Amino acid sequence: MDFFDALTLLGGLCLFLLGMNLMSSNLELCAGNRMSALLAKFTGTPLRGFFLGLAVTMAVQSSSATTLMVVGFVSAGMMTLKQSVGVIIGANVGTTITAWMIALTGLESDIFWLKMIQPSTFSPILGLIGIVMLMACKSRRKKEAGMVLLGFTVLFVGIETMSGAVAELRNSPAFSRILVSFSSPVAGVLIGTILTAVLQSSSASIGILQTLCSTGGITYGMAVPLLLGQNFGACVTAMLASFSASRDAKRAALVHLYFNIIGKTVIVAIFYILNAVCHFSFLNAPISSFQVALIHTALNLAAALVFLPCSNVLVKLTKLTVRDAARADEFQKLDEHLLSTPAVALSNCKEAVGEMATISASAMQSAIQAFHSYSHELAKDIREKEQLADRYEDRIGSFLIKVSGQHQLSKQEISEATMLLRVIGDFERISDHAVNLLESVEEIREKKLQFTKEAQHELNVLCSAVTEILDLAVSAFLSDDLTAADSVEPLEQVIDGLWQQIRLHHTLRLQKNECTMEHGFILSDMLTNLERVADHCSNIAGCILETRHNEMDMHRYLSDVRSESKDFKERYRAYRERYTV
């Protein structure tokens, strides 16, 4: 094997890795979100999770991709640690399909149907279909499907190129001396682990092993330790990804690690113990690509049969390794591992905004309650909720910006992300106004002031209207209720009118000396905060309606509704009759 053969081998490896990347990344793009939903939903038992992990990994051709999805879901609280065990075990078995496809390249026969299932025959056909779909189709999903087929073709071109480059090694004494180092089981495990960790793909490293098998220089005794090491190396990606994740996500990555290390080490150890007793003669015989695929599958299936019935053992072991914290992360839904499946990440963002909406609304309702029945506990609760709403805005905003940068998002999803970015500011301001209102109540108590009965009645009417508009806005967001969203704007108009009326009435009371300027300053602050809450509710409802109706100018949209909608005018009249001073 000369310098140019080495270059050809390197080029073949590059094509193989490119094909793997094209296939797995585009499969995730065109079907990843649906697969993510399946992973999160259909994992009720370890066995069901096993078959789901098996199917998804066979589809995306990457156990690392499936495991990373699972780590992300566990970190986000969408899947329990127990549910993840079956999926991870299934992913390890599902990844063996790649080795079987590579093994088909060595199939030789003159029978027509056997020739047709050889990759060298059908991969060019798939490549032709793929390039036609990529160049002729306008649909994004069809183009992605075309890239999947092209990736499949490139993968097998890479295998054929590597096979051609190593063909001359069959009779090379130098290569035979290198292979002697593989005869040590410890060296074989280390080489397999390092190679897979560097390539970040067990399928790629096993593909290299299968290619080397065509030289006739790899024996059973060399292949088994290499396969064991390659299975160990496959855990590196998930372990690295889990470093910044939640505790349960770290445990999910450890499930992957322990399954491979404990399960397969025990099986291989039993094999070598039996060899010490029986002295298997075939260990020194050359191994074929087909037999590598068979051993790889047998290793994973055997480990799966051991661990599936006792999946709780893996869960307990990971919990012993990673101890529980005293306090759970309130933002675990916003896990960056979910960025690989943006639709799921966006869905989690909306859930987090829903939690923020409930917190902000609760703070405002408590502030209104404090006006009638103040307590130090209530005041403390309002301020804690305001601080929590601030933290939600920071975390959700940062995460949404990262989600918005993912090119897999559809136009509708981009619109949804933009809407969420806008409404979190409104919900945060509502919690600020709750604290401002509380401070006004506390000032009244400290100065021992008392409003007139008329002023108290007017404030009660305004507070009732603000409570209702807040309920409508939060309900519109949480339930995607367009009817509730439509009801917000007419009520906001009524609240604006109330605000002006109450200010006018206060001026008249001042002129009659029925109240003081000190009362006036506090009342003005309270009115301003309540009216601003209504404005933020209007913004929230407007964003929801704008997104659903694909309107780009919310103010023009609302202006048209106010001037032309009969339904708007009827609701406005009904609210004006209900809330009058």
Image (cartoon, helix red, strand yellow):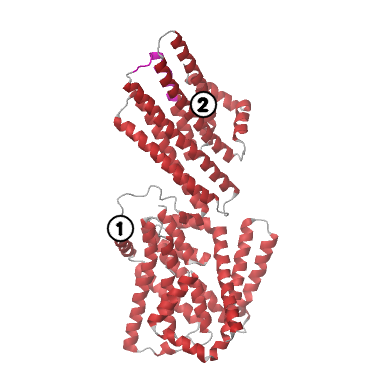
Kindly report which numbered mark, 1 or 2, lies closer to the viewer in this rendering.
1
The chief SS type of the magenta part is helix
Range of magenta residues: 449-464
Q: Is residue 551 above or below residue 66?
A: above
Q: Which mark is residue 323?
A: 1
Q: Position of residue 33 (x, y in %)?
A: 52, 55
Residue at (61, 33) in percent of width and height: 557
Residue at (49, 51) in percent of width and height: 345
Identified by mark 1, the residue type is Arg
Q: Is residue 447 above or below residue 226?
A: above
How many circles with numbers are drawn on the protein?
2
Evaluate whether residue 197 shows in this view: yes
- Which sits in the foreground, 117 or 478? 478
- Please give left or right for residue 328 compared with residue 61 in the image: left
- Quadrant of the image for the N terminus? bottom right
Queried whether the magenta region covers residue 451, the answer comes back as yes
Q: Residue furthest top?
A: 512
Queried whether the magenta region covers residue 580, the answer comes back as no
